[in-house]
Amino acid sequence: MSLSPGSRLGPFEIVAAIGAGGMGEVYRARDTRLQRDVAIKVLPAAVAADQDRLARFEREARTLASLNHPHIAQLHGLELVEGSGPALVMELVDGEDLAERLSRGPLPVEETLAIARQIADALDSAHALGIVHRDLKPANVKVRGDGVVKVLDFGLAKALDPAALPDASLANSPTITSPAAMTMMGVILGTAVYMSPEQARGRPVDKRADIWAFGCVLYEMLTGRPAFEGETVPDVLGAIVKTEPDWARLPAGTPPRIVRLLQHCLRKDQARRLRDIGDAIAQFDAADDALGPGAAVAPPSSRARMAAIWAASIALAGIAAGAMGWAARRPEPAPVLKYHVALQTDGGVIHEPAMSPDGRRVVYVGGARLWVQELGEWKARELGGTEAPSRPFWSPDGEWIAYFRSEALLKVPAAGGPVVRIATLPASQGRFGSNSGAWAPDGTITISMGSGPLLRVAAAGGAPVPLALREEGLVGFRDLEMLPGGGVLGGVQKQDGIEGLAVLQEGRLVPVLTMDGVRHGAYSRTGHLVFQRMAPDPTVWAIRFAMDRLATEGEPFVLGPGSEPSTGGAATLAFQGSTVSLLRQLATFTMDGAIASRIGEPREWNEGVALSPDGRRVLASATDGIWLYDVGTGARSRVTTGGDDVSPVWLPNDMMLFVRYEGDPILMIKPASSLGGERALARHARFPRVTADGRRVVFNTREPGRAMWEVAWLDLDRPDVVHKLDAAHAGARFPSVSPDGKLVAYISGEMGHDEVFVTRLPGGEGKWQVSTDGGGWTYFSPKGDGIVYRALDRGFMFAPVSQNGTDVRVGAARRLFDWGGGWAPFYDMSRDGSGGITAVPAGRSVAVGSLSIIQNWHREFRE
């Protein structure tokens, strides 16, 4: 039955005819229910005329619908059409088929291997479910414009077999019977040149027939000629059974392991043929490594060519020694490898791992700089000059690593070398340093500041340009990663609380997964999205993902405990492993760095400690709220119950300030010695500090919906009036106020990395730079004679500061002591200036970090 444009098949409106063949007529149609384009294949009417065959076909179609793989065209459903045969509703795949591509000549070796590996991956998935294609040929392979391969008509040859044929063995041949009459005479209509010897002889077949056809397709991609030729079908079948391909036609750049793979796929004896297409995948992975960036492919020598021909002759003759020789060197299936890499750094804990595109290296932040771990090496390699880095990511060729430092985007050669500034960024600091970037093959980098507009900048350097993004109610698009084909994957957060993963494409966000707590999405070439969730601890998950439709498939599944997953190569997954708990203990210290006393039990402390004016009590923020400790006895009591309550500050009359994160931070006030009694002072406020008399509060603030933080202050007797220090650099943060309330110190990235500056209150008149080699976490000396701050390497520094009327003088900073990167950056100073309080490492809790690596992870977690 021919269908005309505009006619309907149930909910499907026919748009145009695509083609016709031995398995029916194919049309482009519009699914009016789901508003998507599909392919409709109307099968021969004889299938519907025989009730037994129709029931068998429906059973086979249900099996075929179970195929869910990024390189297999999905079967959506089955429609029974009155007056005609059944119609299959299938995924519509745009692009030319491989036969059209081959009509223009052979493919380059690199392109051939990329296509062949995807075909092999599709076969591997189907064979695992017991489904054999039976009609694999170039016309059944579509190659989209972005290089993604889709195998069509999987298993359809078997589904169309007549069940009542007297010679049941013929039912294993591809497209065996006439579509018009389906007579029992059966003429071979499939493309004979891809039939295996057992098919040509009419014998039963299994998955090894697909492996033979795969070898034929691979040979033709490399040479532009069929592996077996003839003027008539009998001539072709005779060549398949009796002759060998002309191995001398293979291009000089063909890797030797691919030559051997071809020979093994095209063994005429099923028993000696490649048994599992998964073995071929391992060879493609190895060949892909050899053809990776900067690798030269050595053409086989004449002797190697003669050896290949001689090996083929041995196979043709069936010499037992040849078979034994192959068995000795037959490649094993790529195993699933799991291991943890213990990483020793000066800061202990590692975080923000990023896998290189080739899957051989991982860059991560450890201590206060970047490190590169080669998966085949014992020790990680430090990248000098990368102090205070965050969120590293790779260039597409793996030659560079880009990263953020304060308000700068930098890059460093992966092999080590001078750091190069790419761009100065607008001031925007999220609570946890949420900048991220994705480096595209065209040499541009897309940047997310966590919230606010996205930016794009040339990787070679230049000024960032805002990207127009048409998305209502968007709070932030973060954790960016470049996808094959040009889209950018990221985590989305909206004002209505919706979270999940989306793809930025042509100025709009396409939602692909809606789940709470999703972070760090990564695309795996296995056809999955991998991501992190808190459940309630960090856990790595995966879900099937169809790149062509930007749609997830099936249900997400757990891979294991860990965080910040990253993928690379064909099937390598890296993530931050289950490191030893980050336990610290409250402790008092003296200004020479000595620990004077420890307080309470080790636990996971959050952001902020505050020593009472008399030095006898301490407020400390933990993961379950703020606690009050007695410095002498260690006795404790709970002050708040929220895990997002941080930054406690003492006020006179036994009152306290703290910050509660409920989306945006809120400045709160309450009694310091009991639960309850809380009330809000100011919204969009964080990092409060108070003057010695407790009357004025300095803090960070920002306008609703903006990413930029500024320094502001308010008087506690007029908390409704917020004053901004407009003269201070936009994006200034971590403010600290002098005891007399006349100066404010803050951190600014305007120099390209964090430095400490000071300005005057109340209007922000003047600006003086305090640090010259980077700094953060400032405190004024209780005596008002200087500023204590943490250096980029976490050492303690002191810079003298004096005032003479409106003039401020800053002296050269000197180092007080070093604690290294494992110590908490937050601290508080005692009122007499003799020391302070912080949280110090407890035991070996931060001695090492670990990376979890899984190679060929999809084999173990195959759905």
Image: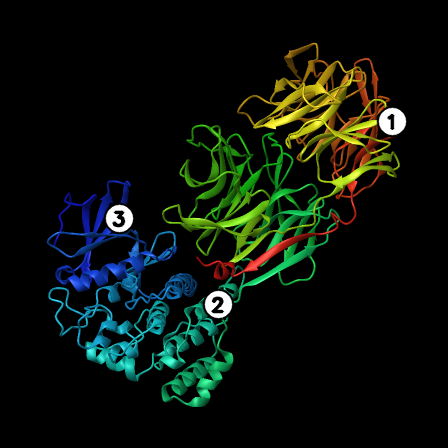
Write the residue at 43% across / 49% down: 555
- For mark 2, give the secondary structure: helix
According to the picture, the residue beneath numbered tag 2 turns out to be: 282
Nearest to N terminus: mark 3 or mark 1: 3
Most distant residue in the top direction: 717
User: How far across and how far down the image is residue 628, in percent?
Assistant: 76, 28
Q: How many numbered dots are placed on residues in this image?
A: 3
- For mark 3, give the secondary structure: strand
Q: CA distance from mark 3 to mark 2?
A: 34 Å
Badge 2 density bin: few <14, some 14–19, many ≥20, Cα 10 Å: some
Which picture quadrant has residue 777? top right
According to the picture, the residue beneath numbered tag 1 turns out to be: 833
| Left or right for 803, reference 318 | right
Query: Where's the C terminus, which quadrant?
Result: bottom left
Query: Where's the N terminus, which quadrant?
Result: bottom left
Residue type highlighted by circle 2: Ala
- For mark 1, give the secondary structure: loop
According to the picture, the residue beneath numbered tag 3 turns out to be: 38
Q: CA distance from mark 1 to mark 2?
A: 65 Å
Write the residue at 24% across / 78% down: 202
User: How far across and how far down the image is residue 857, in percent?
Assistant: 52, 59
Nearest to N terminus: mark 1 or mark 2: 2
User: How far across and how far down the image is residue 381, in percent?
Assistant: 69, 55
Nearest to N terminus: mark 3 or mark 2: 3
Residue type highlighted by circle 1: Gly
Badge 1 density bin: few <14, some 14–19, many ≥20, Cα 10 Å: some
Residue type highlighted by circle 3: Val
| Left or right for 240, reference 416 | left
